[in-house]
Image (cartoon, rainbow, N blue to C red):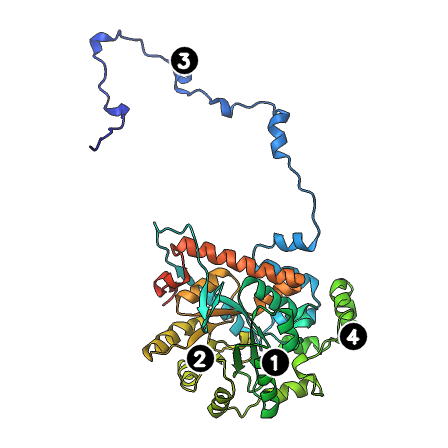
Amino acid sequence: MTHTIQPNNPETTPAPDATDVPAARPATGVAAAAAAVPAVPAALKRRIPRYSDLAPLMQFKKPEFSKEARLKRASTVWELRDIAKRRTPQAPFDYTDGAAEEEITLRRAREAFLDIEFRPGILRNVSSIDLSTDILGKPSRLPVGIAPTGFTRMMQSEGEYAGSQAAEATGIPYTLSTMGTASIEDVAAAAPNGRNWFQLYLWTDRDRSLELIERAAKAGNDTLMVTVDTAVAGARLRDVRNGMTIPPALTLKTVLDASYRPAWWFNFLTHEPLTFASLSRYTGTVADLINSMFDPTLTFEDLDWLRETWKGKLVVKGIQTVDDARKVVDHGADGIVLSNHGGRQLDRAPIPFHLLPEVSQALKADNSKAAIMLDTGIMSGADIIAAMALGADFTLIGRAYLYGLMAGGRAGVDRVLQILEKDMARTMALLGVSSISELTPEHVRILGK
């Protein structure tokens, strides 16, 4: 039986009969004013505070200056970037932080993730959040992996070892760059139980490329990621202004810069010299090596050769149009990475996040099973969830990972992944979603569209 409870409304309570109440003389003057002022609640009466009241409020934490405490205080990737900037000389920091020409592409890529509106569902059971997904036939505990980055031990001496081991511990893929400063074999040894991928620049000299491909396969890499957006090097003006060299040159400017970043220089000078580990057989300047890698004659026929040569999963990185996405899949790619190289090649290039819905729709229309991955601009777990909702199968982080590396080595990379995982779980719970597979384009609206 349903019971209806009526509220007690003083305004509707019948007034007592006038004959039952003796007439009272109306109050006037000061007495009337005093009667109109309500009594002050006890909690609002001023008093002298007692020590027993103050003691619980006076809890001063002991100052902590350790690396662990410093990293723990960082709640966002942006805060880790601030730490990284304080602890890293300008040239390597700017190499990571900068982009091509006026850096318009990088700014737009980050703004793209800001210019969205999440559309949450309510009254869903989100007591347990599952962030795991499958990518290229194998599971990943999070929908994000570490992208290939060059010169990594220049940022911080632990370099690729920190990245691969953090990825292994987290249960996500790690991608070693051809321009890496740790060898394919050393990374495999450092993270023997990790899922290691290898990124390749196809060279004019196919024998060099073939040797790296064979080494990657022998070391247990199950995925080859070929980068195709580097016909020539982009105009990275910060590097030009800094006069950046590999290894960093001890000019007057770098000595002064090092004077208040001694830890970086101590680590740099007391570890193995910086080299391109996968290219150690070859001699020449950095410019010679880069020019030998960035082959301006590449065509889809070269992709066909690579598909025939590599027996594992093949991913093409640097896709910036719908037509090219379709073409590389037709030529045998198992996956694509929508990427403008972090804004480091062509300024004013297409923004991967904006391109994502079109590519996803086009490949679905073709009944393609190719994996769609995305990088560039990701700085939070919410960015990753937005990308997954709009059709990505996976995401990659480059700068975000390097900020953590520069802030604290392996522990800093761990902290980046912890922050992203917490961000993702919170965002999904607030969206009313408990697993990655439940995300749909209905959860995100790109503002202005």
Q: Is residue 140 above or below residue 204?
A: above
Labelled disc at residue 178 = 1
Circles 1 and 2: CB atoms closer than 8 Å: no
Circles 1 and 3: CB atoms closer than 8 Å: no
Using the numbered discs, state the Cα–Cα distance from disc 2 to disc 3 in whole angstroms: 89 Å
In this rendering, the label closer to the viewer, 1 or 2: 2
Circles 4 and 1: CB atoms closer than 8 Å: no
Residue 283 visible somewhere in the drawing: yes
Residue ID for mark 4: 251
Residue ID for mark 3: 31
- Which image quarter holds the C terminus? bottom left
Residue ID for mark 2: 334
Using the numbered discs, state the Cα–Cα distance from disc 1 to disc 3 in whole angstroms: 91 Å
The amino acid at mark 1 is Thr
Number of numbered markers: 4
The amino acid at mark 2 is Asp
Q: Is residue 129 above or below residue 321?
A: above
Viewer-proximal residue among 3 and 117: 3
Label 3's element?
helix
The amino acid at mark 3 is Ala
